[in-house]
Image: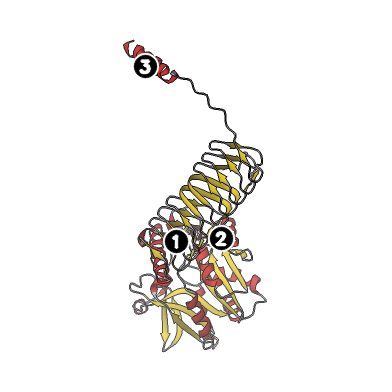
Amino acid sequence: MQVSLIILAAGQGTRMNSDLPKVLHKLAAVPLLHHAMAAGRALDPARTVVVAGHGAEAVSRAARDYDEEALIVLQEEQLGTGHAVAQAAAHLADATGEVIVLYGDTPFIRPETLEAMLAARKDHAVVVLGFEARDPGRYGRLILDGDALQRIVEFKDATDEERAVTLCNSGVICASAKDLFGLVADLSNDNAAGEYYLTDIVALARARGLSAGVVTCPESETLGVNTRAQLAGAEAEFQRRARAEALENGVTLTAPETVFFALDTVIGRDAIVGPHVLFGPGVTIESGAEIKGFCHLEGAHVSRGADVGPFARLRPGAELAEDVHVGNFVEIKNAILDEGVKVGHLTYLGDAHVGEFTNIGAGTVTCNYDGVMKHRTEIGKRAFIGSDTMLVAPVTLGDGAMTGSGSVITQDVPAEALAIARARQETKPGLATRLMEKLRAVKAAKVKG
């Protein structure tokens, strides 16, 4: 079955009180928009159309960051959800199969729910996702006739009897491409808001002899984000679910409430995560690895048996092979550390490749930036880098090479060679005492004066 997605992401989100488009506010370290796209991606869609409006350029970039093949269409005037869907018609004119309409500010729709909607299409031309609301408030109401959906009524247009209904509309709709766009083309804006409601396609479908049905899900799954407070609540809910899932999957979280996951964090069974660890996007932790407390990881891969931290930072492009040790106050960026490498403390490795079983001494820095361009450092196998070594890239150190502590290495070091690059020490007997006496005398004279 071919499935296409339309994701509505044109709204400004005035209640966020922000210059940033609502769908670009971050939840679990990524834009809200990515959550909707992730749910839809599980269906292996043939096409994904994102309807942008406010901040369209930024929304387009974010959509293509997640899916470079996403199609972007501009809704220049926000005239309602039906009008927004109509903007996608040209991109899906030749589409076959099903279309699901999602919302860029509704992050918790599960792929299983979307699959249930697709299955319900066997019995209905239009399928709407609904939920039983604890407090229906201003949600649109789903009015049933037996098991069939008769119509959807927006709160502002509903009678008192209709407002008493607790089965509410999530906004998510599934229909064939042909039916969806045929119905949307006939929408009217004759309502209290003067907008083209997507929800009106249910009544239009029934008028044409087409059936409509409802698939329900828990209310928490339909949570929309319209304010900063709701965004904070959504973050708390996402993290609660992510922590529970990690524990269920065999990950040890020593202080679960202090660990924060990104949307795409992957952690293998029997991995250990200490307190106050923050995962940014693009992190994979293999089984049996350990991330100790107060670490920040983003765009990094940590292999089996490796341990990181405490107080370490892995930035994008950090690749740690098996049994690598990265200790406290170490930062790794765009660097590959082969099996058994040890980087104990107070070190920066950027744009580098470190061979297996090499030891990096405390205070080592790969000086990778010349003010204009980045350069790489290559360190061979079983090398020993002395403490406080500055490796001025581009530079290569061969297998088994060694540097003396405090060296500034600006030239390649052959395999098994020792490189020392520091000024010769001079010792002046008695000078320390004489110098201190002179300084104290100067201070005393200033106090007297």
Disc 3, SS: helix
Q: Nearer the viewer, residue 222 or 287?
A: 287
309 over 113 or under it: above or below: above
Residue 10 in the image: state x and y as whole percent. Answer: 54, 62
Looking at this view, name the residue that lies furthest to the top. Answer: 449
Question: Does residue 17 show up?
Answer: yes
Q: Residues within 10 Å of mark 2 (few under 14, many from 20)?
A: many
Disc ID at residue 440: 3
Discs 1, 2 touching: Cβ within 8 Å: no
The amino acid on which the numbered mark 3 sits, given as a three-letter code, is Arg
194 over 30 or under it: above or below: below
Disc 2, SS: loop
Disc ID at residue 72: none
- Label 1 sits on residue: 261
What quarter of the picture does the N terminus occupy? bottom right
Q: Is residue 296 left or right of residue 441?
A: right
Q: Residues within 10 Å of mark 1 (few under 14, many from 20)?
A: many
Residue shown at the point (63%, 42%) measured from the top left: 417
Q: Earlier in the sequence, mark 1 or mark 3?
A: 1
Residue 386 in the image: state x and y as whole percent. Answer: 54, 41
Q: Earlier in the sequence, mark 2 or mark 3?
A: 2
Residue 112 in the image: state x and y as whole percent. Answer: 48, 78
Residue 14 in the image: state x and y as whole percent. Answer: 45, 57
Residue shown at the point (62%, 66%) measured from the top left: 70
Residue shown at the point (57%, 36%) measured from the top left: 407
- The quadrant holding residue 424 is top right
Measure how far apart labels 2 and 3 are at the Cα level.
71 Å
Measure how far apart labels 1 and 3 are at the Cα level.
56 Å
The amino acid on which the numbered mark 1 sits, given as a three-letter code, is Phe
- Label 2 sits on residue: 53
